Amino acid sequence: DQFGMRTNSGVSLIDWHRDKRIEIKCRNKVEKLNILNGTCNSVDVFDAEKNCKETYSIKSGGRFVLCCGSASPRLLMRSKELTNEHIGKYVRDHICMPLGIYVVAEDQHKLIGPMNNYESIFAMAKTKTGEGDETEFVSIDFFSGELDRLIFLVSSLYLAYAPFNFLKRLMSTFPLLFTILSNAIRVTLVVLVFLLNVLQGVKDVLTLRGWGATKIKITTSLLKFNTSYDGQYEDCKDAITLGFFEDKKDFFIAEEAIKKNISFLESLGAKPFFLLRWALQFLTKIPYKETEVKKFVRNFSKNTLLSEQHLAGGCLFGKVIDKGEEDASAAGRVFGTKNIHVADLSTVPLPRVSTQMTAYMIGHHVGKQLFSSKKRD
C-alpha cells in the first residue's frame, strides 16, 4: 500500500474463497501421516480451536500434498514406513549478518520513499572463499527510510540478533522472556530515537530552520550467504542442526565480503554520531572499520548467530521425491509412496536469493503437473 507495507502474499491458481471444494482450516496442526503399504490413507490433526484431535481420511485415488516448508521433512520422518535415509538431510539456511546503520545526507532524502522501509533493494557481490580461485556469491539487502518508521523493522532485526544464543533458545521455550526482551530492545531504541530527534530539533532551531524541519533518514543492510556445510533434521526433540561456521570458508567469506563492501556502505550515508555508534557497537559489535570486521564475525559465530529462517532442503528432488521426468503425475511424489507429494522449498537446495519466489515456482510446477495429468486421465 502507500505506506510500503505488504498487504498480501502468494500466487494462486485457485479462488480460495469461492471454490466450494476447498475448506481452509486455521489453527490446525498436522501431527501424523497414516501410511499403509505406501498409501497415505488418513491424517491425524490437532484442532486448537476445539482442543481435540481429529482424523481426516483420504479418498481412494486421492493425493496428499505437503506444502509446509520446514515441517515437511519432519512429518515424513515420523512415519515408520518411510526408511529413506535422505529424508531430513542436505538442509541449509542463509547466514544473516546485520551491518551498520548510516544517516542519509539531506540531498539524498528525496530518493527514499515509504516503500524503501520494507521492500529492500539487494545487490550481489562475488567474493573468494579462501581456497584458490574458488568464489562465492553473497547478497546484501538494503533497507532505508525515516528513522521513526524504520526503527520498527530494525527493532525486530535486533531482537532476533542481539540476544546471546542461549537466550534465543530460552525465548522459544518461554514466551514471557521473549516479551521482556522485545520490549527492552524496543524501549532502548525508542529512547535513542527520541534523543536523536531532540538533538536534531535543537540544531534546526539554532540554524533558524524551525523545530522539526529536518527528518532523519537512515539506511542499513544485511549480508546473506549460503553455508559451506549441509545441516540436517535430528531424530529427537524436533531439532534442526545447521552447519553455520563449521567450515573455515564461512569465516573467510563473511570477513572478505564485509571488508570488500564496507567503503560502499559508507558511501550511502554518514556514520551515526559517536555516542550512538558506541552504544550500537557495544551491543552488537557491528563494524564500521575494516579492522573491526574480524572481531564482529568471531562474535557473531560464537554468541549471536542469526539465520534468515528460509530453510531449504530435507526432501530433495531425485533423493526423496520423484522429478516427474518419466511420468508427470509422479512429480514431487515421495519415493516409496503412492500418493504423497511435496511441493515446497524443502525439495530444492537453498537458492541464493528470493526463496519465496522459488517456493511459489515449485508449488506451481508440481500443481500444474498433477492437474495436467489428471485432465489427460
Image (cartoon, rainbow, N blue to C red):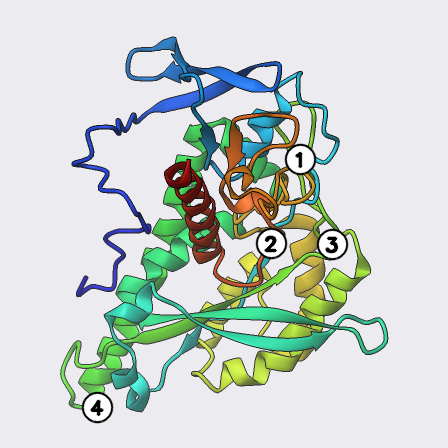
* Residue 93 visible, this orientation: yes
* Residue 195 visible, this orientation: no
Give the amino acid at mark 2: Leu
Q: CA distance from mark 2 to mark 4?
A: 52 Å
- Callout in the foreground (2, 4): 2
Q: Between 277 and 132, which is closer to the camera in this rendering?
A: 132
Q: Earlier in the sequence, mark 1 or mark 2?
A: 1
Residue 41 % position (x, y): 49, 14
Residue 108 % position (x, y): 32, 87
* Residue tagged 1: 88
Q: CA distance from mark 1 to mark 2?
A: 14 Å
Marks 1,2: beta carbons within 8 A: no
Q: Quadrant of the C terminus?
A: top left
Residue situated furthest front in the rendering: 377
Give the amino acid at mark 1: Gly
Q: CA distance from mark 3 to mark 1?
A: 20 Å
Residue 334 % position (x, y): 60, 32
Q: CA distance from mark 4 to mark 3?
A: 50 Å
Q: Which mark is residue 350?
A: 2
- The kind of secondary structure element at disc 2 is loop
- Callout in the foreground (4, 3): 3
Marks 2,4: beta carbons within 8 A: no
- The kind of secondary structure element at disc 4 is loop
Residue 108 lies, with reference to residue 14, above or below; the image says below
- Callout in the foreground (1, 4): 1
Marks 4,3: beta carbons within 8 A: no
Q: Earlier in the sequence, mark 1 or mark 4?
A: 1
- The kind of secondary structure element at disc 3 is loop
Q: Between 295 and 149, which is closer to the camera in this rendering?
A: 149
* Residue tagged 4: 207
Q: Is 286 left, or right, of 296 in this rendering?
A: left
* Residue tagged 3: 245
